[in-house]
């Protein structure tokens, strides 16, 4: 599911922002690199005809340095260590690189007869570890790069093993799911950037409630499958309604919810950049995008399997 950190943090809200000490001058202007509180302020008079020592303590070198700073170009977001779109893109790409690298290992484990047992263990370890670290990262007050990278490692274990199993059962399905996920991502990005597509107001609240209900259903269904309560391949999703598996209906709804959640993620990231929040929050933005894209990929993978059957 998507990252609750976006909706909880004022940093990613329109008009919000994360301000830290000594990030603005007393007059409210952004600080320049090397700024020191109180430096350069006009000293107060100590009496008529008397000048304080500060005036006599400025050397020619200091005057030249102050003039150079005055003539220097304005500081950019990178100079002030503020989050940019490039920061989010680089960290998102890095997390996916970790997922693919670790996933290649678990894929080989699950598809090799001698190590299939290790592959199953890797998949369940990735499932549990990804779930725990996903919740931890979502509700941390400040993003932790180490924990977010650890989440990517566990996601790699899960996705690699699960994708390997699905590819063995339905040859070619992984590439189809990857293409479907990529096409949906590009379509939503274009709709957001050029078509003005937004999910706001009551629609956003309904979306969040629906995602919460779907997550609860998925956890219950997973528990029933693990304890052997249900006999279908996908648990409760295998139940048919008028000849149509419940998983097909839920899968279509989940893909639409994930696509809408991408638009919400884009808006949160845009607000964070416009608010000039600290650069480290790019990790939280990348984490949120990865969670949504991984969720969409898994839904496409499962949905395509029904059509193969």
Image (spheres, rainbow, N blue to C red):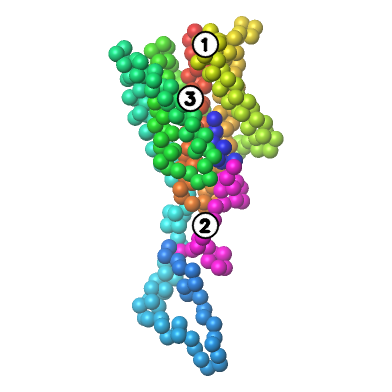
Q: Residue at x 54, y 33 (%)?
A: 2
Question: Magenta segment: does it hold 72?
Answer: no
Q: Residue at x 61, y 6 (%)?
A: 243
258 relative to 22, above or below: above
Q: Earlier in the sequence, mark 1 or mark 3?
A: 1
Q: Which residue is mark 2?
A: 20
* Image position, residue 75 (x, y; %): 45, 60
Q: Earlier in the sequence, mark 2 or mark 1?
A: 2
Q: Give SS at disc 2.
A: loop
276 relative to 168, above or below: below
Region of the chain picked out in magenta, as a range: 8-32
Q: Residue at x 49, y 38 (%)?
A: 137
CA distance for labels 2 and 3: 37 Å
**Tag of residue 297:** 3
Disc 2: CA contacts within 10 A as few (<14), some (14-19) or many (>=20): few
CA distance for labels 2 and 1: 52 Å
Say which quarter of the image contains residue 240.
top right
Q: Nearer the viewer, mark 1 or mark 3?
A: 1
Q: Residue furthest left?
A: 114
Q: Which residue is mark 1?
A: 228
């Amino acid at each position: 599911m998507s990252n609750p950190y976006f909706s909880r943090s004022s940093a990613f809200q329109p008009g919000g922002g994360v301000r830290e000490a000594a990030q603005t001058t007393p007059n409210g202007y952004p600080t320049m690199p090397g700024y020191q509180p109180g430096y350069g302020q006009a000293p107060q008079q100590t009496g008529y005809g008397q000048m304080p020592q500060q005036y006599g303590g400025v050397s020619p070198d200091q005057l030249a340095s102050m003039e150079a700073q005055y003539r220097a170009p304005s500081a950019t977001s990178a100079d002030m260590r503020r989050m940019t779109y490039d920061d989010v893109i680089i960290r998102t790409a890095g997390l996916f690189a970790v997922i693919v690298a670790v996933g290649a290992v678990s894929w080989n484990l699950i598809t090799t007869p001698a190590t299939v047992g290790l592959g199953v263990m890797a998949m369940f370890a990735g499932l549990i570890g990804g779930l725990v670290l996903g919740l931890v990262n979502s509700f941390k007050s400040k993003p932790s790069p180490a924990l977010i990278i650890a989440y990517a490692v566990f996601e790699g274990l899960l996705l690699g093993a699960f994708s390997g199993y699905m590819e063995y059962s339905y040859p070619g399905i992984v590439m189809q799911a990857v293409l479907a996920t990529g096409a949906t991502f590009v379509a939503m990005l274009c709709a957001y950037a050029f078509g003005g597509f937004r999910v706001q107001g009551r629609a956003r609240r309904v979306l969040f409630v629906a995602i919460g209900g779907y997550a609860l259903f998925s956890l219950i269904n997973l528990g029933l499958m693990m304890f052997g309560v249900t006999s279908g391949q996908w648990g409760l999703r295998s139940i048919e309604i008028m000849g149509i598996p419940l998983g097909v209906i839920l899968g279509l709804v989940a893909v639409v919810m994930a696509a809408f959640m991408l638009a919400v993620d884009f808006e949160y990231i845009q607000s964070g950049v416009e608010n000039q929040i600290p650069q480290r929050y790019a990790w939280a933005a990348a984490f949120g995008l990865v969670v949504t894209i991984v969720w969409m990929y898994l839904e496409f993978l499962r949905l395509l399997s029904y059509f193969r059957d």
